[in-house]
Image (cartoon, rainbow, N blue to C red):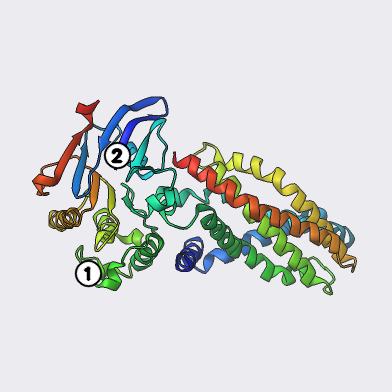
């Protein structure tokens, strides 16, 4: 069992990051999205400061949504999904491993990059680690919601549009909690309550998302 | 293995109705029939990927849905896609698939029946269709799963590897396994005595 899980994990990481270029692409997308806001809002640093939590979270949401509808396409076109279905590992565990690998290849580069971004946005540096932690909770939730949406639209025409319609409403609570905990951090307070709420939504998704995703895959295979 | 009153509907097509069949250990079953008759659908149904509209599949007299995980341990499925990831090397693919399905790894066992060892470090997208098929077929070496479900296993494979494949099939039948496969041409040198050809055109 352990053997299968580690092999699965290794394969997923390799498939999702074909080379070192891929995390760099993620970082590039994120930085170019961030660049839009200072240009459109103008250089006034006060405005930028009050908007920065919203900017950080919206940009990371959009980064997570890029190409999420293709998440299972390759497994299907290679006929690999059937092999997963027949393996002794439950499909929901496999899905969880896939979500974790998706977070490692998209979320982790963003969080590693975040100290640099906070300098760009002129954020105070004293509670940076707490913002990173809340980003960790939020982006992992994005991954879990993302694969749920991706599994629901397998085989649908116009899947790239439908997946966004499914995912965006589900991410709104996570955005609200995340943005408010970032706001508290910027004012120098430790945001216990919103961090707890973020943990709650993450654990809820950890329980729900693998089940929904694996049953959506089973329906597709029929 | 027994198919009992099977009825399979795909989309608006009623592919099978009241279909009964018994598969016995130690035999090879070849499904033939014209395109779109439901060969692949029947194979997928046997593997449990799609549920029949009515009727049931029994494995050792137990319906497969009841203990699906136990049943799935007995199956080796090879679809008409090779289930190889193009961006991984041959070794990574084979190693992962053999761990995933709990079957011996041909590289570690050192059995190179399909002559793929020299391809070990190449990425799968660099291989030709026949080479990919040989890599996928190499998982049949020493495979102890009792039910092999193969969908067009010999598409784009050279004649010399067909012989290797036929020998593997014959060995598996001798070891009391079941092979169910779909094929277009049935004139191969499988063991005549234990081969049954199921022509779906005639049955329906």
Residue under pointer 1: B111
Does the rendering let one see residue A79? no
Residue A104 visible in the displayed image: yes
Residue A195: quadrant of the picture: bottom right
**Residue sitting nearer the eye, A92 or B40:** A92
- Front position in the image: A9 or A115: A9
Q: Determine whether the residue tagged by mark 2 lies in a helix, strand or loop.
A: strand
Compared with residue A60, is residue B183 higher up or lower down, i.e. above or below? above
Compared with residue B82, is residue A158 higher up or lower down, i.e. above or below? above
Q: Output the chain of dot 2.
A: B
B170 lies left or right of B204: left
Q: Position of residue A140 (x, y in %)?
A: 66, 59
Q: Residues within 10 Å of mark 2 (few under 14, many from 20)?
A: some
Residue drawn at point x = 84 percent, y = 74 percent: A126
In percent of width and height, residue A63 lies at: 65, 56
Q: Mark 1 or mark 2: which comes first in sequence?
A: 2
- Quadrant position of the C terminus of chain B in the picture: top left
Q: Position of residue B198 (x, y in %)?
A: 20, 36
**Viewer-nearest of labels 1 and 2?**
2
For residue A4, side relative to residue A172 (left or right): left
- Please provide percent x and percent y for residue B169: 18, 54
The answer to whether residue B145 is above or below residue B62 is below
Residue sitting farthest toward the front: B61
Which disc is residue B2 wearing?
Answer: 2
| Pointer 1 chain | B
Q: How many marks?
A: 2
Circle 1 SS class? loop
Q: Residue at x 40, y 53 (%)?
A: B70
Q: Residue at x 58, y 61 (%)?
A: A100
In this picture, is B13 found above or below B3? above
Tell me: B139 left or right of A106.
Answer: left
């Amino acid at each position: 069992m352990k053997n299968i899980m580690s092999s699965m994990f290794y394969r997923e990481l390799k498939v999702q990051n074909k080379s070192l270029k891929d995390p760099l692409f993620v970082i590039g997308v994120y930085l170019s999205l961030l660049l839009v806001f200072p240009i459109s809002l103008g250089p006034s640093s006060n405005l930028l400061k009050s908007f920065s939590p919203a900017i950080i979270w919206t940009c990371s949401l959009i980064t997570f949504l890029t190409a999420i509808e293709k998440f299972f396409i390759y497994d299907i076109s290679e006929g690999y999904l059937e092999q997963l279905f027949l393996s002794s590992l439950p499909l929901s565990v496999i899905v969880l491993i896939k979500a974790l690998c998706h977070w490692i290849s998209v979320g982790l580069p963003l969080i590693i990059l975040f100290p640099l971004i906070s300098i760009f946005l002129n954020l105070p540096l004293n509670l940076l680690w707490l913002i990173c932690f809340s980003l960790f909770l939020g982006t992992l939730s994005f991954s879990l919601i993302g694969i749920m949406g991706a599994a629901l639209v397998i085989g649908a025409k116009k899947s790239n549009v439908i997946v966004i319609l499914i995912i965006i409403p589900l991410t709104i609570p996570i955005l609200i909690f995340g943005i408010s905990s970032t706001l508290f951090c910027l004012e120098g307070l430790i945001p216990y309550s919103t961090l707890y709420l973020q943990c709650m939504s993450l654990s809820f998704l950890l329980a729900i998302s693998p089940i929904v995703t694996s049953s959506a895959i089973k329906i597709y295979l029929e | 293995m027994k198919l009992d009153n099977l009825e399979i509907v795909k989309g608006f097509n009623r592919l099978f109705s009241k279909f009964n069949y018994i598969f016995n250990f130690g035999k090879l079953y070849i499904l033939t029939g014209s395109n779109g008759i439901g060969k692949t659908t029947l194979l997928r149904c046997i593997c449990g990927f799609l549920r029949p509209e009515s009727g049931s599949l029994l494995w050792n007299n137990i319906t497969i849905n009841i203990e699906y995980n136990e049943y799935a341990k007995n199956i080796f499925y090879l679809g008409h896609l090779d289930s190889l990831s193009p961006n991984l090397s041959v070794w990574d693919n084979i190693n992962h698939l053999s761990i995933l399905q709990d079957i011996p790894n041909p590289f570690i066992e050192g059995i190179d029946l399909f002559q793929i060892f020299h391809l070990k470090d190449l990425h799968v997208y660099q291989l030709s269709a026949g080479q990919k098929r040989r890599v996928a077929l190499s998982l049949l070496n020493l495979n102890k799963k009792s039910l092999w479900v193969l969908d067009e296993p010999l598409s784009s494979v050279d004649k010399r590897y067909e012989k290797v494949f036929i020998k593997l099939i014959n060995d598996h039948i001798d070891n009391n396994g079941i092979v169910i496969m779909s094929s277009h041409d049935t004139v191969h040198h499988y063991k005549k005595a234990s081969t049954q050809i199921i022509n779906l055109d005639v049955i329906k």
